[in-house]
């Protein structure tokens, strides 16, 4: 049997709802001794920093599991890319000006964070308009995710309907469907993989799940994929489970199926 495995990305362990206070206390305790006398203020600043970090995580496509223990749902708004050049530029410029000119950091960084929140607000409105445009162009009933890129006017989308997943791109006002994935019904081959640690961990995180299988000379290979993270017309993130002819698990691999992203998160059995 594979070893017990839990998918532990940024959110589940570090940013449960009840951990905000302890993280703030830890930040205060580890701060410079000269500032510890301002206990309440330093605690408040650290608490705000933790909340702001989690807030930013919730705006990207991966999201954060910040509502535990009340909810295991991953909160992701799909508004910001993991790396936002504009936000990086704003903060880098502020740091350089502060170090070079010696301006009052309080007022200067207040302006920087005001610009940050303004940018996020504008990006959120823009994202909502793109989601509406995709729905209007496709004329389909379902759940639509639009994910950002480094370019302001380039997005990728996933639309899930009752029978299909549609993936495509948005360039400016142009919406293009690239691939369509049919939903396969459950069967004994797929069900035989659901008890593996890799699949159970994957199902805790994935939302737009596409599963398929193919027959091999000595058994079957079942592929679980999260369609939200399609890339270059491929579905790189998921679980590959190999079964023998008796539907016994031979091996399971969880992670990104892309050489530049190896090693995989989880591997059991033959490589």
Image (cartoon, rainbow, N blue to C red):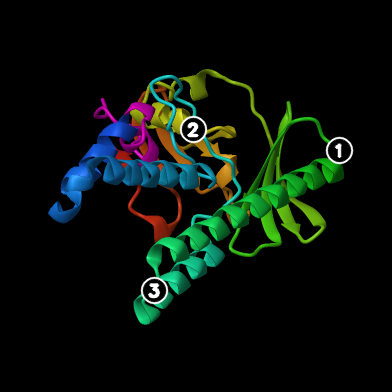
Residue beneath disc 2 = 74
Q: Which residues are magenta?
A: 1-18
Q: Nearer the viewer, residue 43 or 65?
A: 43
Q: Which one is in front in this view, the residue at disc 3 or the one at disc 1?
A: 3
Of the residues under marks 2 and 1, which one precedes in the sequence? Answer: 2
- The quarter of the rendered structure image containing the N terminus is top left
| Residue 270 seen in this snapshot | no
Residue beneath disc 3 = 98
Check residue 6 for magenta coloring: yes
Q: Which one is in front in this view, the residue at disc 2 or the one at disc 1?
A: 2
- Tell me what residue is drawn at x 39 percent, y 38 percent: 11
Magenta region's main secondary structure? loop
- Tell me what residue is drawn at x 49 percent, y 41 percent: 63
Of the residues under marks 3 and 1, which one precedes in the sequence? Answer: 3
* Distance Cα–Cα, label 3 vs label 1: 51 Å
| Residue 108 seen in this snapshot | yes
Question: Residue reaching furthest left?
Answer: 33
- The spot of residue 114 in percent (x, y) is 55, 56
Residue beneath disc 1 = 139
- Check disc 2 and report its element: helix, strand or loop: loop
């Amino acid at each position: 049997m594979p070893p017990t495995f839990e998918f532990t990305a940024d959110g589940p362990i570090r940013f449960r709802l009840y951990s905000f206070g302890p993280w703030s206390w830890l930040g205060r305790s580890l701060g410079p001794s000269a500032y510890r006398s301002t206990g309440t203020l330093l605690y408040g600043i650290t608490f705000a920093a933790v909340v702001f970090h989690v807030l930013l995580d919730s705006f990207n496509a991966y999201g954060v599991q910040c509502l535990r223990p009340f909810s295991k749902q991953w909160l992701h708004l799909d508004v910001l890319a993991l790396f936002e050049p504009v936000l990086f530029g704003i903060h880098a410029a502020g740091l350089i000006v502060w170090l070079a000119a010696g301006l009052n950091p309080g007022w200067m960084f207040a302006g920087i964070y005001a610009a940050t929140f303004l940018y996020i607000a504008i990006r959120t409105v823009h994202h909502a308009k793109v989601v509406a445009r995709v729905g209007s162009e496709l004329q389909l009933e379902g759940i639509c995710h639009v994910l950002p890129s480094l370019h302001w006017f380039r997005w990728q989308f996933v639309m899930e309907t009752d029978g299909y997943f549609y993936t495509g791109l948005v360039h400016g006002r142009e919406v293009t469907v690239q691939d369509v994935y049919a939903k396969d019904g459950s069967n004994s081959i797929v069900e035989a993989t659901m008890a593996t640690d890799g699949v159970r961990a994957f199902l805790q995180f994935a939302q737009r799940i596409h599963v398929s299988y193919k027959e091999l000379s000595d058994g079957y290979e079942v592929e679980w994929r999260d369609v939200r993270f399609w890339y270059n017309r491929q579905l790189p993130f998921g679980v590959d489970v190999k079964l023998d002819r008796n539907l016994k698990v031979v091996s399971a691999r969880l992670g990104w199926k892309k050489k530049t992203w190896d090693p995989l998160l989880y591997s059991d059995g033959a490589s």
